[in-house]
Image (spheres, rainbow, N blue to C red):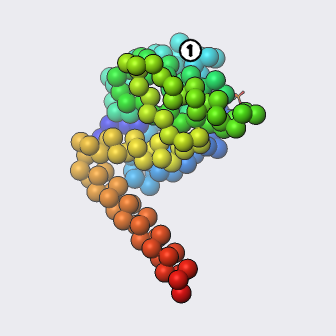
Amino acid sequence: MKKAAVILGSDSDLPVVEKAFAVFKELEVPYEAHIFSAHRTPDAAAAFASAARANGFGVILAAAGKAAHLAGALAARTTLPVIGIPVKSSTLDGLDALLSTVQMPTGVPVATVAIDGAANAALLAAQILAVSDVALAEKLEAKKQADEAAVLAKDAVLRA
Ligand code: RP5
């Protein structure tokens, strides 16, 4: 299976991104995490993205807050799918990061999840990898069914 890359703009993004790690561990998706910044380490970020496909990655997650250019900067250097996670790390409650991540120019797409939506980012990454991996697709299907059963059980409790 191809690996997922998880890039954090700062170690301060870790509490949010840990939810993505948990999903990857649950689904047994191989992943590698790094801290690179579009602004503080632009060369390292660009080098990672440029080599990502050759290095066995199939999808890249990028989490950043404030003027969150990380996902876009990585997407500029690769044709792998890039999923942006806007992080709520400023006085603007993450709206700044959301707009900085989602408003990409035509030709350089970034699939953007909700503010602090790291779990969904990992699920989307797993679904992308599962296009060519039947075993992973089956795990995702089982998880969806378990999630559905959990909600229906809560409904039963509420009605009782
Ligand atoms: C962004 O600035 C990072 O992704 C982080 O969300 C935010 C603050 O970074 P630190 O000053 O905490 O390192 O680049």
Residue 106 lies, with reference to residue 58, above or below; the image says above
| Residue drawn at point x = 72 percent, y = 33 percent | 92
| Residue drawn at point x = 57 percent, y = 19 percent | 38
Residue 34 percent across, percent down from the top left: 53, 30
Q: How many marks?
A: 1
| Residue drawn at point x = 37 percent, y = 45 percent | 126
Question: Which of the 4 image quarters holds residue 140?
Answer: bottom left
Question: Which of the 4 image quarters holds residue 131?
Answer: top left
Is residue 34 visible in the rendered structure shown here? no
Residue 152 percent across, percent down from the top left: 45, 73
| Amino acid found under the numbered disc labelled 1 | Pro
Which is nearer the eye, 74 or 154? Answer: 154
Q: Residue furthest bottom?
A: 160
Residue 46 lies, with reference to residue 26, above or below; the image says above
Residue 143 lies, with reference to residue 62, above or below; the image says below
Which is nearer the eye, 51 or 39? Answer: 39
Q: Is residue 119 left or right of residue 12?
A: left
Which is nearer the eye, 18 or 30? Answer: 18
Residue 60 percent across, percent down from the top left: 43, 32
Residue 12 percent across, percent down from the top left: 68, 35
The kind of secondary structure element at disc 1 is helix
Q: Specify whether tag 1 is near ligand 1 (CB below 8 Å).
A: no
For label 1, the crowd category at 10 Å Cα-Cα, with few meaning under 14, some 14 to 19 and many 20 or more, is: some
Q: Is residue 115 left or right of residue 147?
A: right
Residue located beneath label 1 in the image: 42
| Residue drawn at point x = 34 percent, y = 45 percent | 127
Q: Residue furthest top?
A: 43
Q: Is residue 149 left or right of residue 85?
A: left
Is residue 111 visible in the rendered structure shown here? yes
Q: In the rendered view of the protein, which quadrant contains the N terminus? A: top left
Q: Quadrant of ligand 1?
A: top right
